[in-house]
Amino acid sequence: MQTLISAKDLLKESDNQDLIILDSRFYLTDLAKGKKEYDSGHIPGAIFIDLHHDLASPETEFSGRHPLPANTDFSAFIQSLGIDSDSKVIVYDDMAGAIAARAWWMLSQNGIETRVLDGGIQAWLSVGGELESNAAFPQATANRIDVHFPWAVSEEDVLENMEAEIFQLVDARASDRYEGQNETMDPLAGHIPGAINRPFANNLNKDGLFLASKELSSEFQSLKENIELVHYCGSGVTACHNVLASVEAGLEDKRVFVGSWSLWSKRMLRLMSEQTE
């Protein structure tokens, strides 16, 4: 399975007309900023995709902050981008893959060859890559992919695992959020019982590039203890960064609890409310 592409290698492939490049820049505190950044300058030919509208469906009372879109909706969306089963896709952001990994995870499990630009747009600029401001207008393909998300883990799966212990939950959030010391996004602080912490930032070196696969393999293997790892985070986005890193390391732990802490904390609030009634 494809995982990463270096900026130098993308520069060599930039004339490939069959390559589909996606710009997934996104900022949680300014939902319009991603498109503004794209409009001011993006990798030539890149198509802008929005986490909130294209890689997620609207949040509900019984979902996390970034639930997966309906299968048919995502199928129609990628068809509109010209993506089919033969496509070669590159996705990037400016957060070391924190957002791009979600797109990679969604596309890869549907058999689409997808790579994340290691180091993002910053790495592209560092090797002399140019930017353009003209928006790309993709041509839809006639071939539609029957989308499914077999790597997604549900709330029910997590509840059943409390007894069955089939997999080990891994929390990709920063340690202070995992430990309940700093929570500004979700209604409660803490982590899912039994989860261990592997901040996604630990996948990167000081330059914002992914660590060597051998180093990643050693670190993820130390978490496994002969059990499958299932990743989660705040809303099912940066957990995909841990999946990307583990697959780059040669592991097969691809599943994500998409509802993540944002869904679990809602569940805990409901239980607390019921107990006080």
Image (tube, rainbow, N blue to C red):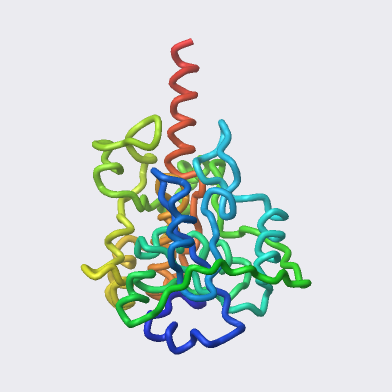
Whole-percent x, y for residue 241 in the image = 40, 61
Q: Which of 262 and 83 is in front in this view?
A: 83
Give the residue displayed 67% in from the left and 59% down from the top. Answer: 77
Which residue is most to the top? Answer: 277
Residue 230 visible to an observer of this rendering: no
Give the residue displayed 30% in from the left and 77% down from the top. Answer: 126
Give the vertical position of 105 relative to 57 (above or below).
below
User: Quadrant of the rendered structure where residue 220 is?
Assistant: bottom left
Q: Which of 181 and 42 is in front in this view?
A: 42
> In the displayed structure, does residue 30 sit left or right of residue 210?
right
Whole-percent x, y for residue 109 in the image = 58, 66
Which residue is most to the right? Answer: 142
Give the vertical position of 72 relative to 46 (above or below).
above
Give the vertical position of 128 relative to 155 (above or below).
below
Give the residue displayed 53% in from the left and 48% down from the top. Answer: 52
All told, the count of numbered labels is 0
Give the vertical position of 134 relative to 271 (above or below).
below
Residue 121 visible to an observer of this rendering: yes
User: Quadrant of the rendered structure where residue 229 is?
Assistant: bottom left
Whole-percent x, y for residue 144 in the image = 75, 68
Whole-percent x, y for residue 175 in the image = 25, 47
> In the displayed structure, does residue 113 sit left or right of residue 161?
right
